[in-house]
C-alpha cells in the first residue's frame, strides 16, 4: 500500500507530494521548492525515511509546480516525467517565474520521460495510473491510485474550485469536460489531493463544486 507525505512550498502555496510504499521506493509529485529551506525539508524527509526516489512526476508544466525539479534531479540522480504536451510550459517557465516574481534562479530543463494517458507508474508493488486531464494547461495529467482510492489532480480540480484557464493553453470547456469525463467517473469516495489547498473527495465535488457540479 502506498503512503503520502505532503509539503506546501513557494509563495503560491503549492502542494508537493512524496508517494512511497513499504519497499521504500518513492516518486516526487510536483516539487515546487523555491528556497534551500524547502529543498532541505523535502530531502530531509526522503533521507530520514531511507526512501529510494524513482522519478519526479509533474502534473503539468507551470512554474510553481516544477521549480524544484533541477534540485531534486541533481540530489538523487533521477529523471523528470511529464506528458509530452506540457513541453511549451517548461520552455516558458523562466518567463513565467519573472511574470509572477518567483525566485527561480536555475533553468528548468524539459522532462526526460513521457507519461501518456493510461500508462502505469510502478512504485514498489503499487501503481499510479496516468489520467489525461487537460484544460488548466496543455499536457495536464492526474495520477490515480486505484487500490488506495486516491487521485492527485494537480491544478485541474480543487476543493470547491477548478484551475484557472486564462494562462496559455488553458480552456474552460476542456477543463470542465476533463473533470466530468475523467475524474467524476472515479468512485465517489476517491480522495482528491490537489495542487493547492485542502483535499476533498470526488463525491463532494460532484455535489458541491459550483464550476462542475453534476
Image (cartoon, rainbow, N blue to C red):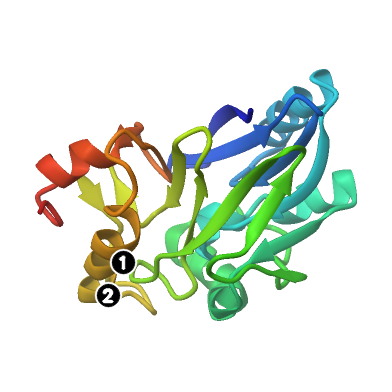
Is residue 192 at all visible to an observer of this figure?
A: yes
Which percent across, then down, holds residue 119? 62, 64
Q: Residue at coordinates 45% horizontally, 75% vertically from top-left?
A: 138
Is 162 above or below relative to 108? above
Q: Disc 2 marks which residue? A: 174
In x, y percent, where is residue 53?
Answer: 80, 41
Q: Quadrant of residue 203?
A: top left
Question: Looking at the image, do the residues carrying marks 2 and 1 touch, with CB atoms under 8 Å apart?
Answer: yes
Disc ID at residue 137:
none
Residue 44, by quadrant, is top right
94 or 174: nearer the eye?
A: 174
* 155 on left or right of 143: left
- Residue 185 appears left or right of 107: left
Residue placed at 55% from the left, 30% from the top? 6
Badge 2 marks a residue whose secondary structure is helix
The residues tagged by marks 2 and 1 sit, at their Cα atoms, a distance apart of 6 Å
Residue hosting label 1: 178
Amino acid at each position: 500500500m502506498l503512503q503520502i507525505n505532503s509539503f506546501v512550498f513557494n509563495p503560491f502555496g503549492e502542494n508537493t507530494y512524496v508517494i512511497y510504499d513499504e519497499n521504500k521506493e518513492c516518486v516526487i509529485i510536483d516539487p515546487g521548492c523555491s528556497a534551500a529551506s524547502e529543498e532541505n525539508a523535502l530531502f530531509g524527509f526522503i533521507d530520514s525515511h531511507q526512501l529510494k526516489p524513482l522519478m519526479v512526476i509533474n502534473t503539468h508544466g507551470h512554474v510553481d509546480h516544477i521549480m524544484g525539479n533541477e534540485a531534486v534531479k541533481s540530489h538523487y540522480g533521477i529523471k523528470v516525467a511529464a506528458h509530452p504536451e506540457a513541453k511549451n510550459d517548461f520552455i516558458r517557465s523562466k518567463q513565467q517565474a519573472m511574470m509572477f516574481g518567483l525566485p527561480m534562479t536555475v533553468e528548468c530543463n524539459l522532462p526526460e520521460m513521457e507519461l501518456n494517458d493510461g500508462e502505469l507508474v510502478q512504485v514498489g508493488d503499487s501503481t499510479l495510473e496516468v489520467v489525461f486531464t487537460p484544460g488548466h494547461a496543455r499536457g495536464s495529467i492526474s495520477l490515480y491510485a486505484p487500490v488506495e482510492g486516491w487521485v492527485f489532480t494537480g491544478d485541474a480540480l480543487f476543493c470547491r474550485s477548478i484551475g484557472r484557464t486564462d494562462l496559455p493553453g488553458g480552456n474552460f470547456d476542456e477543463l470542465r469536460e476533463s473533470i466530468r469525463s475523467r475524474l467524476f467517473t472515479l468512485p465517489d469516495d476517491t480522495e482528491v489531493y490537489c495542487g493547492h489547498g485542502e483535499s476533498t473527495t470526488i463525491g463532494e465535488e460532484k455535489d458541491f463544486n459550483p464550476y462542475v457540479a453534476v
